[in-house]
Image (cartoon, rainbow, N blue to C red):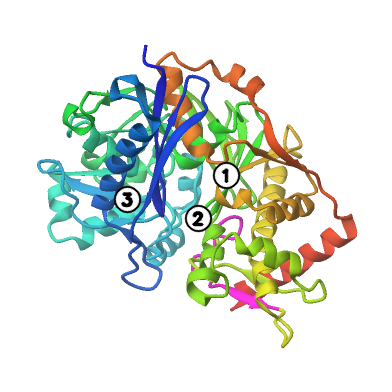
Amino acid sequence: MAGTILAIDQGTTSTRSIVFDADLAPVASAQEEFTQHFPAPGWVEHDPEDLWRTTVATAKAAVDKAGIGVGDVAAIGIANQRESVVMWDRATGKPIANAIVWQDRRTADRCAQLEADGHGDMVSVRTGLRIDPYFSATKIAWMLDNVPGARRRAENGEIAFGTVDTFLLWRLTGGKVHATDATNASRTLLYDIASGDWDDDMLRVFDVPRAVLPEVRDCAGHFGTTDAALFGKPLDVRGIAGDQQAALIGQACFRPGMVKSTYGTGCFMLRNLGAEPVASRHGLVTTVAYQFGGKRTYALEGSIFSAGTTVQWLRDGLGVVTSAAVTEALAVKADPEQPVYLVPAFTGLGAPYWAPQARATVSGITRGTTRNELARAALESVAYQSRDLLEAMAADAGGASGEGVVRVDGGLSANGWAMQFLADMLGAPVERPAVVETTAVGAAYLAGHDAGLYPPPEALVERWRPERRFEPRMNDAARDAKYAGWQRAITQTLAT
């Protein structure tokens, strides 16, 4: 059997492909950024053709860099940005409009109306989610109602919907497979997480025709075979998961109580709940963590919309840093007597506040404030938001995480200062893996496990080792004082 796995990690700002060997170690990778489109305030779009083009280009480049032939690839695994909506013509495969990205807030008013109409409780019970423009359903309805002729054609079965994984799978298989996995389905507001199927009541509430929906499958399994013309040889797609669930898998968080937190464009913290879902009472959502053999495992999730994007704003919006890496050195030099708080509500606030209309604020600025303090505030905001989530998880799930540790990954986790402050603010150890791009690791594991290359989940748990462990150093009084300042800043932001 071929001894490598090709993992495709289709993210919000770039697409990355990584070849993993038989020991689940990365061999070669390729990455390509693509254009972000902001056609109106609060709107975020992608050209689906950019997502497809960068997927094929990086996949080919990674295989070439690995110095292997296509015949050495046992399977493909896909991880993807979740909640983003793509719709395309079934006959031609061409998108009917730009993809509406998970960050997009154009349907905030529609969500508020649905909530006011009394649908919130039923939606929460069935889907584990809350009515918010973050999720897919209102985006689908918006596209059907605003692209000329789309709703009529959708009801006639001429239009297909998919999260990004589904669109890529359709293209990879030459239009032969219209499917998704349970993790991505659980992010749409249309999926009953208990029964494991699309929910007719949700389709009615959100005005989405069943005819557009894909088949829902396990995370690991044979999804289809790629068109031979793409890579020179047909390849099996054997694993799919939404990016945050893929990271949970890549961090080997297979035991109930284990927590991982991914710091990329946003921040996404998941806590494994095991076989029984827990309804959140503290602003989190309940989601499918993974599904094997038709059996679902659930997770509590808290989503922060701005983490890495906060640093990007310092670089691209204000021009106060030249690169993300510079923020670590600036934060070290920041004046401890200059407490500045940045609440990065650039596209609203996610969990546990769910305030889509909120906008970013900076407080505590004086004439002595410099870019050092702004850089520190940007990094600190990630830790403060993470504490918001961890405390909500403890309240919902009945205590601290099962391991007493938070496993971190994503680009921002490479920042040592930020991770030390995170450990200080959480009052808990933070563990960083050797391969911080665990989304791709998870996608590779799903495909490789189904192909017979990788061991069962229990064995992966035992094999996992951190590259570095950050222990909390801050005393309780200092920790609580800093967090109290953050809570005041949040209150001010929500009041504006």
Query: Along the polypeptide, which appears first: circle 2 or circle 3?
Result: 3
Q: Which residues are magenta?
A: 350-363
Instruction: Using a 10 Å C-alpha cutoff, classify the residue at mark 1 as few (fewer than 14 neighbours), some (14 to 19) or many (20 or more).
Output: many
Which residue shows up at 74% across the image and 55% down it?
421
Residue type marked 2 = Thr
Q: Nearer the viewer, mark 2 or mark 3?
A: 2
Query: Along the polypeptide, which appears first: circle 3 or circle 1?
Result: 3
Above or below for 116 versus 294: below
Hey, which quadrant is residue 393 in on the image? top right
Reading the image, the residue beneath label 1 is 301
Image quadrant containing the C terminus? bottom right
Give the percent coordinates (x, y) of residue 407.
66, 39
Instruction: Using a 10 Å C-alpha cutoff, classify the residue at mark 3 as few (fewer than 14 neighbours), some (14 to 19) or many (20 or more).
Output: many
Residue 239 vs residue 368: left or right? left
Instruction: Tell me the element at label 3.
Output: loop
Tag of residue 394:
none
Q: CA distance from mark 2 to mark 3?
A: 18 Å
Which residue shows up at 16% across the image and 48% down it?
94
Q: CA distance from mark 1 to mark 2?
A: 16 Å
- Whether pointer 2 and pointer 3 mark residues with C-beta atoms closer than 8 Å, the reply is no
Which residue shows up at 52% across the image and 21% down it?
23
Residue type marked 1 = Glu
Reading the image, the residue beneath label 2 is 265
Instruction: Tell me the element at label 1.
Output: strand
Q: Main secondary structure of the magenta part?
A: loop
Instruction: Using a 10 Å C-alpha cutoff, classify the residue at mark 2 as few (fewer than 14 neighbours), some (14 to 19) or many (20 or more).
Output: many
Reading the image, the residue beneath label 3 is 85
Give the percent coordinates (x, y) of residue 299.
57, 36
Instruction: Tell me the element at label 2.
Output: loop
**Looking at this view, is 94 or 217 the one in front?**
94
Point out the residue furthest to the left here. 91
Q: Nearer the viewer, mark 1 or mark 2?
A: 2
